[in-house]
């Protein structure tokens, strides 16, 4: 039984999850019924001296670098604060958080000498993204809220559009303030749950990969499942009907899914042709597999899967307007069932395995970018990391831990340099200045370079549609940048 939901949101120095950093954290704790324990809160975070903020990002959240650098806490303090907020049995929730905020959090813990993933699952913890739930309400229960639209009539799911239209932003600060955004997110969740509590509870169950696995085993092969996903696009009503016959491997979180719009013989022939031309890159293979209607469903990524047989008539009618042809799809499902009972099924599995293979990734030169390319932590490294954040800066400088994972020796040095620079020896300080210089001059990656920031400033200054306050903000940004320590 989960005891609380932590709604959270970051405003960041840019959109790159590894190169950029949060400059503001907003949060609000509610009970499982979305009733708040307290008002939403926020704090500023200062950037380390090897990271520069994007002026484009600044124009969105309107937090000047001089402000977050003066009033913000360090990333080590941010990690400590997150540790305190994410208690056992907490659901960590946001809006589009799986694609954005959660990945920033993984990197915060990674750079701060912590297990990057334990906050997501250990001691009854879990994470929940409201965005796919909102999408599911749009498809299956659209009367729940009012839906903003573009001029062409297409719906918009951005929080800063949904909030005002449904009066969820009353008595709050402007949009793109982290504390306001989390309050709107929690209010939106509460409104959806009040409209249809059973449906909201059903959506929430999908954070449990065992629940999703049971769904797939019960209906994925037999009758197929309807997936609500932004990747299907407006043209398909954000849905696709899937036949889900098997797992990629026994220990994999990925199941293989076939879009029931596509004729099975065409899919089989297309897969054979792809496998016979394996000189294509993995990215190319997956793109062409997607064109054939071959996808993966990741059970630990909160996929929104629903029984096709349980769809209401009005839902079917709406989806029919997007070209959903249930008769044709059921005919394709019957063909897949016939293949499933034939020797061709083994060939289908082998074809899917070949096309959906993962290409081994090489370790980046810069350890900051290596979170997703390294191994999972060994038990010994987990034990080491459990104690390091508790040590004072001076004590950290006196130890030389031996990690199984080669990334963590350099990470420990950078952790000290970014958060406790006063504890560095002269030799360590010179080493850090060399690292900082390489980052800001773009050695290895332009993502961290001063030139990228200067190019952005030039591009933005040449726009003819800037508001006066935006022009002033860019001028203040330029003055701040000119006063930064030399590279």
Image (cartoon, rainbow, N blue to C red):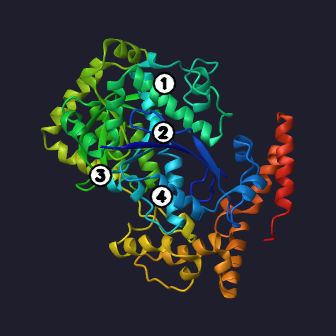
The dot on residue 83 is 4
Q: Quadrant of the C terminus?
A: bottom right
Measure the C-alpha gap from mark 2 to mark 1. Answer: 41 Å
Comparing labels 2 and 1, the label whose residue is closer to the camera: 2
Measure the C-alpha gap from mark 1 to mark 3. Answer: 29 Å
Measure the C-alpha gap from mark 4 to mark 1. Answer: 42 Å
How dense is the environment of label 1, judged by Cα within 10 Å: few (below 14), some, or many (20 and up)?
A: few
Q: Are marks 3 and 2 in contact (CB under 8 Å)?
A: no
Residue depicted at 81% across the width and 50% down the height: 457
Q: Is residue 169 left or right of residue 82?
A: right
The dot on residue 353 is 3
Which of marks 1 and 4 precedes in the sequence? Answer: 4
Measure the C-alpha gap from mark 3 to mark 2. Answer: 48 Å
Residue depicted at 54% across the width and 66% down the height: 111
Residue depicted at 53% across the width and 44% down the height: 8
Secondary structure beneath disc 3? helix
Comparing labels 3 and 4, the label whose residue is closer to the camera: 4
Looking at the image, is 471 positioned above or below residue 81?
Answer: above
Task: Please give the residue where the numbered disc 1 appears in the rendered image.
Answer: 235
Looking at the image, is 241 positioned above or below residue 31?
Answer: above
Closest to the observer, 276 or 356: 356
Task: Please give the residue where the numbered disc 2 appears in the rendered image.
Answer: 37
How dense is the environment of label 2, judged by Cα within 10 Å: few (below 14), some, or many (20 and up)?
A: few
> Residue 486 at x, y = what percent?
81, 70
Q: Are marks 1 and 3 in contact (CB under 8 Å)?
A: no
Which of marks 2 and 3 precedes in the sequence? Answer: 2
Closest to the observer, 324 or 487: 487
């Amino acid at each position: 039984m989960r005891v609380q939901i932590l709604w959270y949101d970051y405003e960041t120095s840019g959109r790159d999850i590894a190169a950029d950093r949060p400059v503001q954290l907003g949060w609000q704790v509610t009970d499982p019924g979305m009733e708040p324990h307290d008002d939403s809160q926020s704090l500023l975070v200062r950037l380390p001296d090897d990271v520069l903020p994007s002026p484009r990002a600044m124009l969105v959240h309107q937090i000047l670098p001089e402000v977050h650098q003066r009033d913000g806490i360090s990333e080590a303090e941010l990690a400590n604060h997150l540790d305190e907020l994410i208690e056992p049995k907490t659901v960590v929730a946001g809006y589009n958080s799986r694609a954005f905020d959660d990945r920033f959090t993984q990197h915060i813990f990674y750079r701060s000498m912590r297990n990057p993933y334990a906050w997501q699952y250990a001691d009854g913890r879990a994470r929940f993204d409201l965005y796919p739930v909102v999408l599911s309400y749009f498809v299956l229960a659209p009367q729940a809220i009012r839906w903003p639209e573009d001029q062409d009539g297409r719906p918009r799911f951005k929080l800063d559009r949904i909030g005002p239209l449904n009066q969820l932003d009353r008595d709050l600060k402007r949009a793109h303030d982290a504390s306001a955004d989390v309050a709107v997110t929690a209010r939106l969740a509460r409104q959806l749950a009040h409209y249809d509590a059973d449906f909201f509870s059903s959506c929430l169950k999908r954070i449990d990969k065992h629940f999703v696995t049971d769904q797939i085993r019960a209906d994925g092969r037999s009758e197929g499942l309807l997936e609500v996903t932004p990747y299907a696009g407006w043209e398909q009503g954000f849905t696709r009907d899937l036949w889900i016959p098997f797992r990629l491997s026994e220990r994999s979180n990925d199941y293989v899914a076939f879009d029931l719009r596509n004729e099975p013989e065409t899919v089989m022939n297309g897969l054979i042709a792809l496998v016979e031309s394996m000189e294509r890159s993995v990215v190319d293979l997956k793109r062409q597999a997607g064109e054939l209607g071959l996808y993966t469903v990741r059970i630990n990524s909160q996929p929104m899967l629903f029984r096709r047989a349980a769809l209401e008539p009005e839902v079917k009618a709406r989806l029919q307007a997007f070209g959903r042809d249930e008769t044709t799809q059921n005919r394709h499902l019957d063909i897949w069932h016939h293949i499933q009972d034939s020797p061709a099924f083994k060939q289908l599995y082998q074809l899917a395995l070949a096309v959906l293979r993962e290409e081994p990734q090489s370790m980046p030169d810069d350890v900051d970018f290596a979170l997703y390319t390294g191994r999972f932590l060994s038990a010994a490294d987990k034990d080491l990391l459990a104690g390091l954040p508790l040590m004072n800066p001076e004590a950290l400088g006196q130890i030389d831990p031996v990690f199984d994972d080669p990334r963590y020796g350099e990470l420990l040095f950078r952790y000290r340099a970014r958060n406790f620079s006063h504890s560095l020896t002269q030799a360590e300080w010179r080493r850090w200045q060399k690292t900082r210089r390489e980052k800001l001059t773009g050695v290895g990656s332009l993502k961290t370079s001063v030139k990228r920031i200067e190019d952005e400033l030039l591009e933005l200054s040449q726009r003819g549609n800037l508001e006066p306050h935006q022009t002033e903000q860019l001028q203040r940004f330029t003055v701040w940048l000119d006063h930064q320590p030399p590279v």
